[in-house]
Image (cartoon, rainbow, N blue to C red):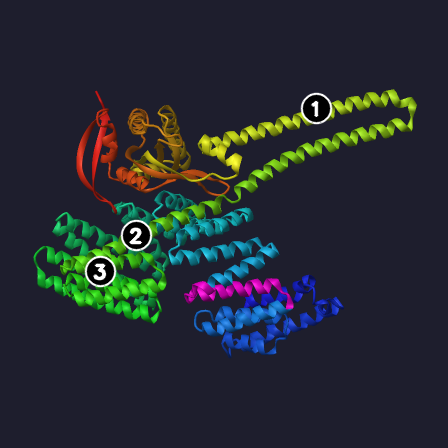
Amino acid sequence: MSGFILKLYEVFFIEPQKTQQGHKSLMCSFVPFVVQKYIYIVFLIGLLSSTTNAQTELDSMLQLLNGAKQDTTRVLILDELGWMLKMEDPDQARKHLNEAIELSNKLNYKRGLSKAWNDLGVVETIHNNIEAAIEANTNALKIREELGDKKGIASVYNNLASIYDEQGKYIEAISNYQKSKQLREELKDTARIARLHYNLAIAHDNLGNYVEAQNFILKYRIHAEQTEDEEALANAFNVEGNIQFGLDDFKAALVSYSKADSLYAKLEYDWERATALTNVGSILGDIADKEVDAENFNEAKILFDSAIDITKEVIKIRTEIEDESGLGEAYNNIGGVYKDYGSYKLEIGKKNEANQFWNIALNYFRKAEEKFDSTNSKKGLLEVYNGYGDVYRRKKDFGEAKNYTQKMLDLAIELGDQRFERNAYKDFSKIYATQGDYKTGYDYEKKYNKLRHVIINEDRARSLVYQRALFGDMQKDLEVERQAARNALLDAKIEREAIVRNSLIGGAMALLLLAMLLYNRYRIKTKANQALEEKNIIIEKERERSDELLLNILPEETANELKEKGSAKARKYDSVTVLFSDFKGFTMIAEKLTPEELVAELDACFRGFDAIMDKYNVEKIKTIGDAYMAVGGLPEPNQTHPQNVINAALEMQAFMDKRRETVDTFQMRVGIHTGSVVAGVVGNRKFAYDIWGDAVNLAARMESSGEPGKVNISEVTLALVKDKFKWISRGKIAAKNKGEVEMFFVERLS
């Protein structure tokens, strides 16, 4: 109850001094008022102390409410009751919070009003009433902006971001997280800045922006290490594992998840440990699938068995801590493993065992369905219906397969989840094609493709909205700089005019001093003009410095557009060549170096790469950790970009080979792909030039599938430079979400 008593203290001793208009009666005879309030708060504390042992805290609060007047004290009690009931009794929570809102409006108590709207937003978020949650948070935001409450505004932006994140609207989530982060940086709230780095890492990971995700999670991890926060460090390892999993670096992901699991076990955090083990089980299941595709059946069996054992451990933990939602997820996951295990059995000719495993999968899906029903998790039900449909299709029970696929489709449409809606069309297409009804299968395939393009276009549109939101303050920042320059000129002018005026007054007082005053006036005026000229020089130098800084982080064409128009439009380039590089064994070597030595070595390598990019007219995009990204063919399109980028990559490898002759440094992989991208400016104040598109993802796949000391390129790039370099075909190599892709190593012609 101490938190509530502190709130009462604020009302009794602080609030009367800042009461809004319409409460003049509270200001009358202030000293007696404070004495009365003091007597009342002592009584309340005594009341709470005497009843806590006999009644629940909730009963105590309800007693206080019954005796409370229609004032700000009652608002706080109502708000506290709403907060206490947010999980167990949301209807009563809404009732108390709505009464707090109504009373706050009558009293013109803005802070109480903003708090009640904020807490109502939390209640609606918990119980998945998304529109109501957004409305409540929007109302809280408006009031806190009127109050100039930066902390409160940052909190609301974070709440909105969390809502969008849960909906899968990651662009909107990132935009709101960035707004919250900007305010926290102004407040120098390092702990919450770190947490926002964590949230941004997860959102970018969900979007597949792995470079950005890695950047944010490294910042979060550094803060965790500096503060010796083992829980935060475990969270960082868990997210790092997710990013590595997304990049198909399964071994690194397993190491990260294992580190997270060890820390959670040490801290006795069962829920978090279950989450880390869930991720391990998912990886093992995915690796098992790949081994089946590669016909490594013995390895696949071991991996499937391990995935099942680990997921059963997750089920045990979730059961012990009574985590119903987590149990639903675990049952669904183990059902998915048995589903794929059944397909493995069918692949090796054991049809009966395949059916046994599929029946086990169905049993686990039923358990998951029960848990998701009880927790009202409609997204969980989508996953289960998808699992049911897959199993029945593999069992060739097409009636049940259609039934559950239709359930998935109906629920996806109800929730507005276009990705599951698309999956349903794809599954229907497979079912009807397997039955030989190719016309109906083709109709569903068309629906699938149509919706796929809608989703792609919506993602692009959201990306542009996100960029505009982030760049909206850019014009304001430039205008602030211009206004500062104008103020400097105006100050100099005022100073000069004041000197002239004082000189004239002095001349009128004594003619005998006229000559001296005129001389003094001339001398001071000259000094003022000199000062003005010096200020103009300083302003011009600062402008030049600002321009140089802008050109250092943006291409000249984009920087000029930004200065002239206050914004820079995203631009599509039909043909560019993207380069990704990454150091092998970075973690191992980094552990042997001090932080200063590590940064110095990275700086030496990247400075060398920068010089190589300049030499071959290749545009550096960014560095994240030990990764380096560049692109040829923009911002000024040219025809030689594939050749330029490959020459740069080969020289980068030569640079590293030469450096290793004298320094124990890294080995490097380089991947290159040619295709179309969209380029533009991202970020708020610390903005940056970046590129997006499938070509970027495929270049990253080229790098992760390469070998140290080699330059790995795609078939598209090779076709453009075939006669200019020696090349070695590597055949088709599996790339995540791309299937098997032709890859080639290139070398210079001898």
Which amino acid, mark 1?
Gln
Count neighbours of disc 3 (C-alpha within 10 A) and say few if under 14, some if 14 to 19, many if 20 or more.
many
Location of the C terminus (image quadrant) = top left
The answer to whether one can see residue 439 in this image is yes
Image location (x, y in percent) of residue 571? 40, 38
What residue is pinned by disc 1? 530
Which amino acid, mark 2?
Arg
Image location (x, y in percent) of residue 32? 74, 70
- Mark positioned earlier in the residue sequence (1 or 3): 3
Q: Which mark is residue 452?
A: 2
Which residue does the image show at 50% across and 66% down from the upper left?
Answer: 120
Residue 118 on the magenta segment = yes
Report the Cα–Cα distance between label 1 and label 3.
81 Å
As drawn, 334 above or below 563: below
Count neighbours of disc 1 (C-alpha within 10 A) and say few if under 14, some if 14 to 19, many if 20 or more.
few
State left or right for residue 576 relative to residue 437: right
- Find the magenta span and give its range: 107-132
Residue 60 on the magenta segment = no
Q: Which mark is residue 430?
A: none
SS state under label 1: helix
Q: Quadrant of residue 688?
A: top left
What residue is pinned by disc 3? 428
- Mark positioned earlier in the residue sequence (2 or 3): 3
